[in-house]
């Protein structure tokens, strides 16, 4: 039975584990909306299928699909991937899926945050979003897991934890006027502490330039393990990302985590600027209320938007000269894992990358 609980994870002794801890599996959604994905989402569907196939070499994968795409998704996804009918407005399981929490007895529950399409009627990316807002509850029902309903607008891409009491986020994202305009920074921090069961929140000032989420940390920085962070970087002073990464580097290098450790911060150089090509923009339907895709618009490409799975890490590649160094650096920093590059451009054209379309369910 999946109950909705009146208590909180912290009160019940549940915490969000680090993504690098063991997973029972991965959840994803299936892209289809033609006002976000070009050419009726066909290229994006191939890209999502490649991500699901790569992860499924390491752990079970479930993909939630709207009813009209069920047969197509079943045909395009490898047989070892479970496909379930699950309606959504778009395909960002990181952001609308549950945040799973565990206790010391190995029990798993889920946090269901409020979802408003990255900014609601103030600066959200599409309207309506009511199907996305129900995804977390439906995933927890399928898994028969109890649910905490958190009174905070939050997408999973705006937080990372080390599983040992520390959370990283950005001020740009969580203090954004479209998310929780009535809550102070202290009130938001208190909710993070209660629902993730962390003791320390590190507020990085800003995320990646041109990111339509306005500051998701999962495109900027992540924990490789407790005490160790990877950060997207550029050596080009004239790039709009330089100032953002430099301030994050300064901030994180001076910070300590909840255990009092100084953080080690490793830089991963971003790809060269990637812009929407005219033929890519042309394939996207124009719909009032959905963020338009303009030719020439710079995309927030980052290798940090990768996903840990059991024994592996699935990293977006961009057919860029920096791909090789990014994969090699991650392999050096994560020697116990197999680092797999999967093309990320089609996912990036929709506004995110591999981390944004996946959600880990802990073991
Ligand atoms: O987490 C993300 N980066 C998702 C971005 C959503 C974009 C919707 N067009």
Image (spheres, rainbow, N blue to C red):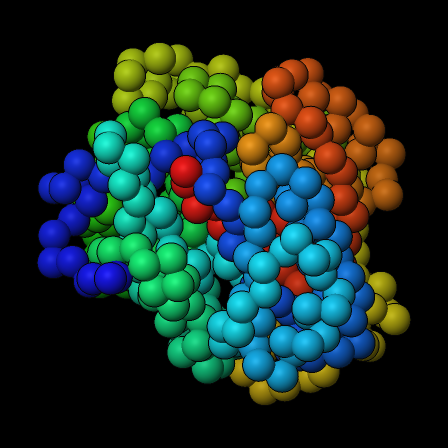
Q: Who is closer to the viewer here, 310 or 9?
A: 310
Residue 191 in picture, x, y percent from top left: 21, 48
Q: Going 51% across and 45% down the picture, which residue do you hit?
A: 25
Relative to 303, is 250 above or below? above
User: Looking at the image, is 73 positioned above or below residue 256?
Assistant: below
Q: Quadrant of residue 238?
A: top right
Q: Is residue 39 left or right of residue 258?
A: right
The residue sitting at 64% across, 44% down in the picture is 55
Residue shown at 70% from the left, 58% from the top: 79
- Residue 326: percent from the left, percent from the top? 73, 29
Q: Residue furthest bottom?
A: 288
Percent of width and height locating residue 157: 47, 49
Residue 262 appears in the picture as rendered: yes
* Residue 189 in view here: no
Examine the rendered structure and indicate whether residue 133 appears above or below residue 247.
below
Residue 363 in which image quadrant: top left
Looking at the rendering, in which quadrant would you find the N terminus?
A: bottom left
Number of marks in the image? Answer: 0
Q: Is residue 208 above or below residue 348?
A: above
Residue at the outermost top position: 261
**Which x, y percent locates residue 229?**
51, 24
Q: Residue shown at 46%/32% (left/top)?
A: 22
């Amino acid at each position: 039975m999946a109950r909705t609980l009146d208590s909180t994870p912290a009160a019940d002794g549940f915490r969000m584990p680090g993504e690098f801890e063991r997973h029972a599996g991965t959840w994803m959604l299936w892209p289809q909306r033609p006002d976000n994905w070009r050419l009726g989402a066909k290229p994006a569907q191939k890209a999502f299928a490649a991500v699901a196939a790569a992860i499924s070499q390491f752990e079970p994968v479930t993909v939630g699909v709207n009813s009209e795409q069920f047969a197509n998704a079943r045909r395009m996804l490898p047989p070892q991937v479970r496909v379930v009918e699950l309606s959504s407005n778009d395909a960002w399981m990181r952001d609308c899926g549950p945040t799973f929490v565990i206790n010391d007895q190995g029990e798993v529950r889920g946090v269901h945050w409020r979802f408003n399409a990255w900014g609601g009627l103030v600066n959200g990316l599409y309207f309506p979003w009511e199907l996305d807002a129900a995804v977390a509850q439906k995933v927890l029902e399928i898994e028969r897991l109890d649910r905490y309903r958190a009174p905070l607008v939050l997408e999973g891409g705006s937080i990372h934890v080390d599983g040992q009491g520390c959370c990283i986020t950005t001020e740009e994202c969580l203090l954004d006027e479209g998310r929780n305009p009535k809550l102070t920074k202290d009130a938001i921090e208190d909710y993070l502490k209660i629902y993730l069961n962390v003791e320390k929140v590190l507020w990085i000032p800003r995320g990646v330039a041109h990111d339509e989420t306005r500051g998701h940390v999962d495109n900027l920085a992540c924990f490789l393990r407790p005490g160790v962070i990877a950060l997207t970087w550029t050596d080009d002073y004239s790039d709009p990302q330089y100032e953002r990464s430099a301030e994050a580097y300064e901030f994180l290098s001076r910070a300590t985590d909840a255990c009092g450790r100084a953080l080690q911060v490793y830089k991963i150089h971003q790809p060269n600027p990637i812009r929407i090509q005219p033929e890519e923009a042309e394939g996207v339907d124009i719909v009032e209320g959905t963020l338009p895709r303009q030719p020439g618009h710079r995309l927030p490409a980052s290798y940090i938007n990768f996903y840990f799975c059991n024994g592996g890490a699935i990293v977006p590649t961009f057919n860029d000269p920096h791909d090789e160094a990014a994969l090699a650096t991650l392999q050096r920093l994560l020697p116990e894992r197999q680092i797999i590059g999967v093309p990320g451009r089609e996912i990036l054209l929709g506004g995110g990358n591999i981390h944004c379309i996946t959600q880990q369910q802990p073991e």
